[in-house]
Image (cartoon, coloured by chain):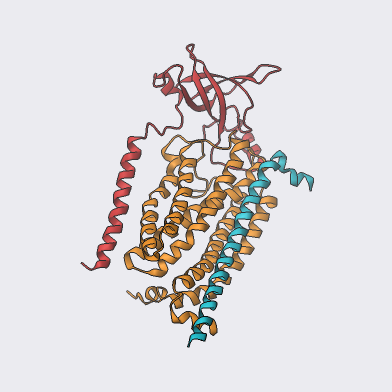
C-alpha cells in the first residue's frame, strides 16, 4: 500500500498550502447548490398534502441535522487519527470541526422546534430523537470547553479527542432513535434502506441542499484548519517563508 | 407574492426557520474568515519581529 | 507492539467498551425510555390509574366529536387491538386527523377514559404533493387508512 499521500497530509506546510488552494473549489459549488436548492425548496417544490407550505421547513431542517451528524463523525475520525498516529494536523482538523458542528446542531434544533409547533403541537418534547440531538450539542460544547480548559495544546488535543471518540456512540443512537423507541418524530425519509418516501419533485431540492451543505462544510473547514495550523505552528520557520512568498 | 410570503399560514414558522439556517451559514463564513485573518495577522507580526531581531 | 499499535488498540478498546456499555444500558432502560404507552399496555394494566403518562396510537375514524361552542373534543385512540376513549379540551395541532397518529399526555380516570391536557400529532415519513394524494385516493377508493408507521 502507498501511504505517501497520508504522510504528506500530515505535514503542516503541505496541508496549509493544499487547504488554501482547494477552498474555492468547494466554496463556489457550495454557494451555487445552496442558493439553487433553497430557491427550489421554497418555490419549485410542491406543498405537502398534509402539511401544506409548512413542509418547506424540511429544506433547512434536514440539511442542518445532516451536518450536525456528518461533522461529528468527521471530528471523531480526525480525533482518533490524531490520537493513534500522533498527528498534530488531525487534531487541528478535529478542533476546527467543533464550532461548525455545534452551530448546525443549534440550527437543526431550532428549525425542528419551529416545525414541531404547528405540526405536532409543541416546540419541544423529551422524545428520544430530540433528546439525543440535544446531547450532541452538549458533546460539541463539552469538546470546545475541554480544549479551552487546557493551556497545553497537546494535552488539550488528547483529552478532547477521547471525549470526541466516546461521543461517537451517540451518532447511531440519534439516527436509530426513531426506529428503536416509540418516538414522536417520524422515521427517516431519505437516509433509509429502500426508496425515499417522497417524489422526485420534493426529493431533488433536498439532495441538492445536502450536497451543497456538505461542500460548504468542506470549504469552511479548510479555512479554519489554516487558521488552526498557523496558530499551532507559530514557532516554525516555514510560516515566515510562506508569508513572505 | 403576498401568497408566497404567507406560506399558507405557516409564515411565522417557515421564515424564521430559513432565517436561522441562513444566519448559521453566514456566521460560519464570517467566523472562519475572522479566525484566519487573526491568525495571519499574528503570524505576520511575529515574522516582522523576528526579522528586526536578526 | 509498537506504541502506535498500542494507541490504536486503546482507541478501539474505548469505542468497543463504550458501545457495549451503552447497548446494555439502553436495553436495560428500554422500558423506561418508552415515550408513550399504547392502548394494549393500558388495557393490560401496565399504567396505574391516576398517574400521568403519555398515550400513543391512531385516532379511530369517525370517533371525533366536538362539543359545539367549546374546545371540548372526544375521540378514541386505538392500536387495532385495544381502544381507549380520550377527552381533551384545547387547541389541536394541524396534523391531528382521523386515522392518523396521536400522542396525548394526561391521566386515566377510574371509568377508563383518558383525560388529556396535551395532544400532539405524530405523522409518518411520507411526503407527497396534494394532487398525487388526491389521485391515489381516487385509485384506491379511500384515503390512506393504513397506519403508515
Q: Is residue C92 visible?
A: yes
The residue under the point 29% across, 49% down is C17
Q: Quadrant of the N terminus of chain C?
A: bottom left
Which residue is outermost to the front?
Answer: B53
Which residue is outermost to the left?
Answer: C1
Left or right relative to C83: residue A42: right
Q: Colour of chain B?
A: cyan
Q: Determine which quarter of the picture holds residue C13.
A: bottom left
The residue under the point 32% across, 64% down is A84
Q: Colour of chain A?
A: orange
Q: Determine which quarter of the picture holds residue B36.
A: bottom right
x and y, in percent, of residue A206 in the image: 59, 53
Above or below, comparing residue A32 to residue A132 in the picture = below
x and y, in percent, of residue A222 in the image: 51, 68
Q: Which chain is red?
A: C
Left or right relative to A230: residue A107: right
The residue under the point 62% across, 59% down is B26
Amino acid at each position: 500500500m502507498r501511504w505517501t499521500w497520508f504522510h504528506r497530509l500530515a505535514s503542516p506546510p503541505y496541508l496549509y498550502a493544499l487547504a488554501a488552494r482547494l477552498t474555492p473549489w468547494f466554496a463556489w459549488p457550495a454557494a451555487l447548490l445552496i442558493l439553487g436548492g433553497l430557491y427550489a425548496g421554497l418555490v419549485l417544490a410542491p406543498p405537502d398534502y398534509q402539511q401544506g407550505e409548512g413542509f418547506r421547513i424540511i429544506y433547512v431542517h434536514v440539511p442542518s441535522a445532516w451536518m450536525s451528524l456528518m461533522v461529528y463523525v468527521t471530528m471523531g475520525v480526525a480525533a482518533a487519527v490524531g490520537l493513534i498516529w500522533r498527528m498534530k494536523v488531525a487534531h487541528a482538523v478535529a478542533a476546527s470541526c467543533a464550532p461548525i458542528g455545534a452551530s448546525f446542531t443549534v440550527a437543526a434544533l431550532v428549525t425542528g422546534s419551529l416545525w414541531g409547533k404547528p405540526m405536532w403541537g409543541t416546540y419541544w418534547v423529551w422524545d428520544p430523537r430530540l433528546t439525543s440531538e440535544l446531547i450532541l450539542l452538549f458533546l460539541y460544547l463539552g469538546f470546545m470547553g475541554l480544549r479551552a480548559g487546557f493551556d497545553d495544546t497537546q494535552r488539550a488535543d488528547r483529552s478532547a479527542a477521547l471525549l470526541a471518540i466516546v461521543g461517537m456512540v451517540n451518532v447511531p443512537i440519534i439516527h436509530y432513535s426513531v426506529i428503536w423507541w416509540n418516538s414522536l418524530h417520524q422515521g427517516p425519509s431519505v437516509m433509509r434502506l429502500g426508496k425515499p418516501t417522497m417524489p422526485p419533485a420534493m426529493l431533488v431540492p433536498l439532495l441538492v441542499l445536502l450536497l451543497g451543505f456538505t461542500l460548504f462544510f468542506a470549504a469552511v473547514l479548510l479555512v479554519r484548519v489554516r487558521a488552526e495550523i498557523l496558530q499551532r505552528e507559530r514557532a516554525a520557520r516555514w510560516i515566515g517563508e510562506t508569508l513572505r512568498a | 407574492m403576498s401568497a408566497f410570503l404567507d406560506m399558507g399560514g405557516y409564515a411565522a414558522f417557515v421564515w424564521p426557520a430559513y432565517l436561522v439556517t441562513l444566519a448559521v451559514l453566514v456566521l460560519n463564513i464570517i467566523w472562519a474568515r475572522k479566525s484566519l485573518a487573526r491568525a495571519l495577522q499574528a503570524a505576520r507580526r511575529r515574522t516582522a519581529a523576528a526579522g528586526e531581531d536578526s | 507492539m509498537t506504541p502506535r499499535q498500542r494507541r490504536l488498540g486503546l482507541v478501539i478498546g474505548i469505542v468497543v467498551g463504550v458501545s457495549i456499555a451503552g447497548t446494555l444500558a439502553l436495553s436495560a432502560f428500554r422500558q423506561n425510555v418508552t415515550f408513550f404507552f399504547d392502548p394494549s399496555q393500558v388495557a393490560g394494566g401496565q399504567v396505574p390509574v391516576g398517574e400521568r403518562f403519555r398515550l400513543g396510537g391512531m385516532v379511530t375514524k369517525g370517533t371525533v366529536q366536538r362539543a359545539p361552542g367549546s374546545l371540548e373534543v372526544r375521540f378514541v385512540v386505538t392500536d387495532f387491538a385495544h381502544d381507549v376513549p380520550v377527552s381533551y379540551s384545547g387547541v389541536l395541532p394541524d396534523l391531528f386527523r382521523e386515522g392518523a397518529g396521536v400522542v396525548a399526555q394526561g391521566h386515566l380516570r377510574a371509568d377508563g377514559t383518558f383525560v388529556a391536557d396535551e395532544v400532539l400529532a405524530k405523522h409518518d415519513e411520507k411526503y407527497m404533493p396534494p394532487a398525487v394524494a388526491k389521485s391515489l385516493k381516487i385509485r384506491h377508493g379511500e384515503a390512506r387508512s393504513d397506519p403508515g408507521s
